[in-house]
Amino acid sequence: KEKAGKRKLFHSLVKLANELRRTRDESIPLLEQRNYADKMWYDGGIWRAPELLPGVYNRSFYTTRLREPISLTDLFFGLTIVTAFTRVGVAISKMGFVDINSLLYFGVFWSVWGKETSYGTRFDTSDLSAQAVTLVTCFAVLFASLSVQTPINSVDGGRVMFMAAFVAALHLLLHIRVVVTSREMEDDEVLQQQQQSNKDDDNGQKTEADPMVQLQSNIAAYGTFNAVMCFLELVVWLVGAVVFPTDWPYRWILFLLGILLALRVPRALLATDFHAACSKRGVLFILLLGFLLQSIIVVASEFFTYQTPTFEHYCFIGAACFMLFCMKLLYVDDSNILAVDHALMVNKTAAFLFNVGQFSLLLSTTVLGSGLNLLTHDYLAATQALPGPSKSMVCGGFSAVLFSTFFIKSMHLKRIPASGRGQCLFISAYLLQALTLLAVVGVTAAMCTGNVSGVLAALMDEDITLLAGLSLAAFVVVVMHWLDEGVELALYSSAEESRSLRVHPFGFWWCLKPDEANMLERSLGGVADDPSSISDAGFIDSNRGSNLDLMSIGESTTGLSVTTPLLDASSPPGQGYSSTLGASELV
């Protein structure tokens, strides 16, 4: 009896220790995040060295980081970029179509936002040096946005090139500072490790490798790579603005080359703070919608100065607002997607295509806003019977926005139940969503070209009927967009239950197959205590091993693509998704 009692007590202590360890692992990242949020902006000096965000070096922040509102500095920078986007939209409105000049100008401003976001989602930007860089970048973008209504083969086109070169030079200096700082910190870490190794050798103990040394090495490699790319981009912009003449017919090649050099391989060398990047993308899109709505009201206000708005006018403005609100609802909110299912986390090809979809969404939304401005002016000026590009621009922009949202949503991994009935319901919902959206996209694209007759031709006759029809189509697409969520609510009683049963991932595209280096991390639970385990893909390095066994790996039962399920259909009931962390782990 005494041995049985001791054995029972021992098992109870082991269970208690495991629970305490799990609680500690879950609480440490939250405490670090709280300490980071409570830190004063001047802690460590107002002109301090670049500092990594907590979500970069701690793997758990990909699923547990508290989602803070975007900083006011980032919000102001987003307003500046959106102002530049809308200036390009004004140029598109005057042209009546999207030409190569507007496309390249838009790409330049988008690349500037990408560079600022890439740095801001890896390093702390609350110090004075980062604030100063953001401020002068805002000035440069605003000044360059005044020159986008002229072709690239002009003096104003050269000014845009000088702006891009100036921003590239700023980020060149930023990343040189990152390299210098990381090298100094790496040398300090190596020195401390050598001192500790000497002490351990004297005591006959084995010294473990310091993971911070490898992390600082990764930071230095990241800074060196970006410094080189920024230097090449700077050279291209300066050569194009100074060496070649203004009327050189192939100047667009230099613009394209500069934009391509500004692009980065997603999650290369150093991982990003995933939720911070998602927040910046969402805020930029919402700001763009707000600016477009404001521009519609500004156009209408010029007419309402001399006449009182009628009920029909209110319906027209309301339909435009309702359409933009539906665009907001159709926008893929990253907070509703598991981090491990996101295209940015699957592999680099999917991440690149996801960024292409984001660029297409911003550009098509700008075109839609330009068309709505022209349509509002034609309607209130009673010139809707005259031929013009407004209706074609609205239909084309609407079609492109819907297709971009569909493409972005399809870039994420989908999850269906293991049971046959639930599996059929989810697959039917996904297919019905895709068919409905593609049908609306095809019809509106045909309306853009003018090759329609019957009811569609009648919709094109009146501005208000066209806007009402497009708003109704947007509402139908939104309802279909929520179909998979409705099926989930009908099948499951809670989010935790749905996450534990929806175990078969599949993707619509060939690239939605997790990298081999990510499969181990996708199947293992827990928190990475080793900061150096951040690989190029942003996950734990599979070569470091673990004391947990790899869960069974199989193929998707849907037959749409071959992927690696997080949990096999035969997994025990005790293995599922944690509703707190939102990623696969042993619970």
Image (cartoon, helix red, strand yellow):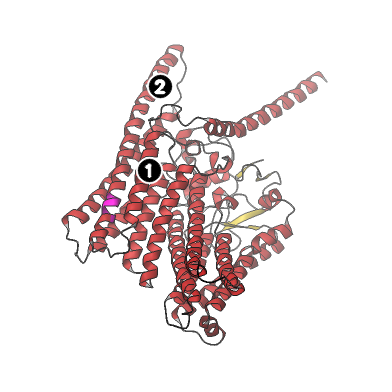
Q: How far apart, in angstroms, are the residues tagged by discs 1 and 2?
A: 40 Å
Residue 392 location (% of width, % of height): 45, 76
Judged from this view, the residue extending furthest toward the top is 202
Image check: 534 left or right of 231?
A: right
| Magenta highlight on residue 542 | no
State the mark number for residue 96.
Answer: none
User: Would residue 585 be visible to someone looking at this image?
Assistant: yes
Residue at 22% over, 51% down = 238
Q: Amino acid at mark 2?
A: Gln
Majority secondary structure of magenta residues? helix
State the mark number for residue 135.
Answer: 1
Residue at 41% over, 41% down = 270
Where the C terminus falls, by quadrant?
A: top right
State the mark number for residue 193.
Answer: 2
Residue 315 location (% of width, % of height): 60, 71
| Magenta highlight on residue 162 | yes
Where the N terminus falls, by quadrant?
A: top right
Determine contact: label 1, label 2, CB under 8 Å: no
Considering only vertical position in the picture, is 536 above or below 152?
above
Magenta region: 160-165
Residue at 58% over, 50% down = 335
